Image (cartoon, grey):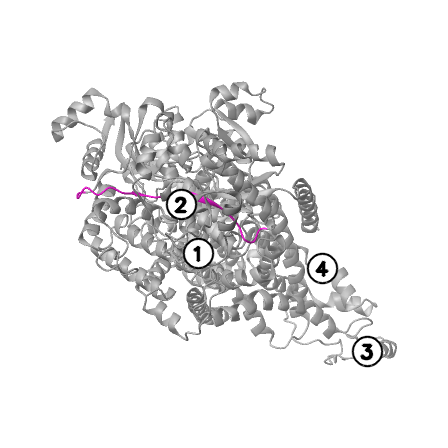
Amino acid sequence: MKSTLKVSLGLAAGLAASTAMTGASQAEDLTLCWAAWDPANALVELSKDFTTQTGIGMKFEFVPWTNYADRFLNELNSKGKLCDLIIGDSQWIGGSAENGHYVKLNDFFDKEGIKMSDFVDATVVGYSQWPKNTPNYWSLPAFGDVVGWTYRKDWFAKPEIQAAFKEKYGRDLAVPATFAELKDIAEFFQNRDVDGKKVYGASIYTERGSEGVTMGVMDVLYSFGFKYENPEKPYDMEGFVNSDKSVAGLEFYKSLYDCCTPPGASNSYMGEGIDAFKSGQVAMHMNFAFTWPGLQKDESVGGDKVGFFANPAGPDGEKFAQLGGQGISVVAYSEKQDAALKYIKWFATTDVQKKWWSLGGFSCLKSVVEDPTFEASQPYAKTFLDSMAIVKDFWAEPSYASLLQASQKRFHDYVVAGQGTAKEALDGLVADWTEVFQDDGKI
Amino acid sequence: MRGAETPETMQDPSGKPVVTDTTSSILDRAAEAAVRATPDNLATRVRGLSDRMVAWIFIAPTMLLLLAINIFPLIWAIQLSFTNYRANRPNEEVKNIGLQNYSRILNDHDTWIAMQATAHFVLWTIVLQTLIGFTLAYLIDRKFRGHAFWTTIILVPMMLSPAVVGNFWRFLYEPQIGLFAYVISFFTGIPPTEILMLSSVKLAPWAIIIVDTWMWTPYVMLICLAGLRSIPDYIYEAAEVDRASNWRQFWSITLPMALPFIMLAVLFRGIENFKMFDMVNLLTGGGPGSTTEVASITLKREAFEKWRTGFSSAFAIILFVAVFGLANIYVKVLNRVKSR
Amino acid sequence: MSAAAHSVVAPSTTSKRVAATFVVVYAVISMIPLFWIFATSFKTPPDSIAYPPKVLFTPSMEGYCNLFTTRTRQTPEYINSLPPATSFCDETTRKRNMVIAGPSNFLPRFVNSLIIAFGSTFCAVFLGTLAAYGFSRFKVPMADDLLFFILSTRMMPPIAVAIPIYLMYRELGLSDTALGMILLYTAVNVSLAVWLLKGFIDEIPREYEEAAMIDGYTRLQAFRKVVLPQATTGIAATAIFCLIFAWNEYAFASLLTSGTAQTAPPFIPTIIGEGGQDWPAVAAGTTVFLVPILVFTILLRKQLLRGITFGAVRK
């Protein structure tokens, strides 16, 4: 029968192919899991040194950001053995530590003389510690990242644009120092003709599926005075999450989305932002710092055409930025933990970190970023340093995924779909988060 | 020549109902004896395995597999739905919380929004696919030259993966770089950048309906075609002898006789679209906001992103009971229509 | 019959032409999105995101090259320092200031799809044929209820089924294994297979087997030599349906597999370029993935038609 023949052929081909593939992998290979983005490619390059030094081959499993959390949290929760090393998102620390997904690294650090004080403090707290601000380390800070902005320096420099802006707003067109100024600039560029094409003001985060809109909104809310909880009473959120200042910040974000973004940008995260900026659609673009090296080198918008600035200040002068970045951890279910630890030891050395920076990886080692030559090494280095100094992060609780889902829903419903008011969205968020913490037994 | 009898009982040519034995050794000897003793009789017990053994061996593996992969998990899901278990905290103590999950779901505003989005999707896709599908089937049944070729062409969208379809339709729906906006703009004059299928709260539900209709109308068409082809010619010929107009023939012959098939198509599409996940998840992700968040997407978020396993099991049971109940009622109506 | 009136049984030429026009127009319109995707697979990445969309363009194999490789961006000096390009894809990639870093995951995922889809189809059809024969020929207690129960297993949303299956597979170590996926797809498909095949087998007159058994064949031999050959059409039709489902399935694949056993549908939407999705590569992946199922279905389209109608076409 035709179908049996096809089936047998298919099975035979499959078996042949799979045996060929399994034959190729060796026992001493390590698999490193990360997101599929530029820095990952840089890490592949960098890791060739490790293989040369130790003879341990490196295999990589990279997944795009939109599926990254889904895929790897799934993997960790199923006690999968796919990953020996994982560069997990900063917010996974709580869950991974408490559920035993990561190997605790304190003893290893002590044995090998790796000191956490050698790394930028914000990155140690953000990527490595759980509980926060206690000396319990679950990862080595691997990649520093923070939300900042890029802008079209060449457009800002055009005399006719400068004149038109000055006429309209009474001040010079320059890098915005406050969000109000940023909005003015965005409105100015929205639907303007530049170089024969219609352009738009800014590209901001609006993605619903993973964490996009939350990262974007928080980046702005922090500077408007948003606080996660009462500093004196943990998990007490009423009046802090939904304070008047927070409401003003959320309303600002929605007004920015409505007035000054390209059409159809209702589900935009890092990739879409890069595309929008590279194709010359927007004057400014909010994105994590990891995008800066690629944009700097880009043929169409790189070099002198692109400029960088840190998050502007809010109406009260507060200035914060949303932390990104990850630490590298050893997966507790791996059967090659010794080899994995060797990788971490190699990665923590100063020379490797220096090379990491030069390849496009944002090192977290103080001796690299506080080096006098650092600022001059790249046009975006100073903005990176300035931004890392003002970081704040989202919850890293074990139930962070539920907290994130709640904010994703509330923010996207309000900002993109225009449902309800900002106050209702934030009140609802307090209710959602309270429920999560109650389920957890923290309240 | 094909017999239409439904085999309810086994009969030998003389009309006697047949007895099957249980023990194989007795069986063997008795079989030989029977064969020797009644050469004209149809011996259903044969050398080798008895019919009952064969029946068991043939049916049991399927039933076991279904029990293991469908029923056992269903029972486990029911049991989970009464607990607060979370799959990402396997070491935490699991508490039985009775009907709390169920009451939370039924009282949750967001659940009802998801059900609304699902109902809107199911309703309109069924309406559009039935109308277009039946029309296409009727036209193809005119048997113009080359109709077999064009039928095959129409079938192609059905063979794609719904997830991959959702993904590339996102590309097609882009306002600035997508084909859809430019085609619509060509016919209506609205600038493409204002045709926001996926970002607009009003249009996004229609975006998913259009894609599903594009994919599955061929399926409905095939079933209706089978229905149309099952109507014997002589009924039409008799109607023409009676000088019935085409219109009348359609309403009193074609439609009623094809109705069971149409209803079958509606049933299958309805069940499938109630469960829809792949295409919508990749096309809109449930957005903008929650306007296209169909029930399966909510379920996935609860189960595999928030890891509220107990809670999501309860939601799953509710969905299953709903579909099962509706399908049951529908099938009874369908059977009544069939027997008319 | 009067030639002027439109007859339902023998339609007039005009009505045939009208019908043909509408059907052809619909067929062409419904193929446009697919043609567009096919065309996109031959565009360069900048061409694919040009606005307004380009109908005329210079074709390039970049999409297919990008589908099968991973690349990194390097400086022109580094690229010039490398040995000359070895393959066509090497050359194409270097023109964009990138070098090939290795193969992509597409081919392993495609092979997984082949193994899992064909494997589960074979199992489902095999088990389904046996069970259908059992229900058709033997008096099984509670047959109608069992059959409805079998059909009702298809009414759960896949995500719902995935929750306990996920937990079960985690305990049994079947997470992310081809065996686990084959079992799951077989279980999902076997219900449809039993229903379809029972319809086909019901149509085969019992007299043939019974004659064979009088001639001395055992039940099993009669089944193999008499019933199966006549059921080939039905089996082929069932196989197509099972294959289409298993080949295109996404929900279970994305939730229960992550690397080793992942199939192509969860993989294709994750093909990204330097920013957002690499549309030529996604289009190339879509095209490549469509080809086997298209070939299979076109070859067996007559059986497909019979299968959809449950063999209920009576003429």
Taking C146 as reference, is C94 above or below it? above
Q: Is residue B184 visible?
A: no
Q: Which amino acid does label 1 sit on?
A: Gly
Q: Marks 1/3: CA distance? A: 64 Å
Where does residue C28 sit, x and y in percent of width and height? 45, 39
| Same-chain status of marks 1 and 2 | yes
Locate residue A308: give its quadrant. Answer: top left
Is A384 within the magenta?
no
Q: Name the residue under label 3.
A: B27
Q: What element carries label 4?
A: helix
Where does residue A373 sit, x and y in percent of width and height? 38, 26
Q: Marks 4/3: CA distance? A: 26 Å
Where does residue A272 sit, x and y in percent of width and height? 37, 38
Q: Marks 3/2: CA distance? A: 78 Å
Is A325 within the magenta?
yes
Q: Name the residue under label 4.
A: C228
Q: Tell us which disc is closer to us: 1 or 3.
A: 1
Q: What element carries label 1?
A: helix
Locate residue A165: give its quadrant. Answer: top left
Q: Tell us which disc is closer to us: 4 or 3.
A: 3
Q: Mark 1 points at which residue?
A: A95
Q: Tell us which disc is closer to us: 3 or 2.
A: 2
Q: Are discs 1 and 2 less than 8 Å apart at CB?
A: no
Q: Marks 1/2: CA distance? A: 17 Å
- Highlighted range, magenta: A315-334
Q: Which of C76 and C272 is in front in this view?
A: C76
Q: Which mark is residue A124?
A: 2
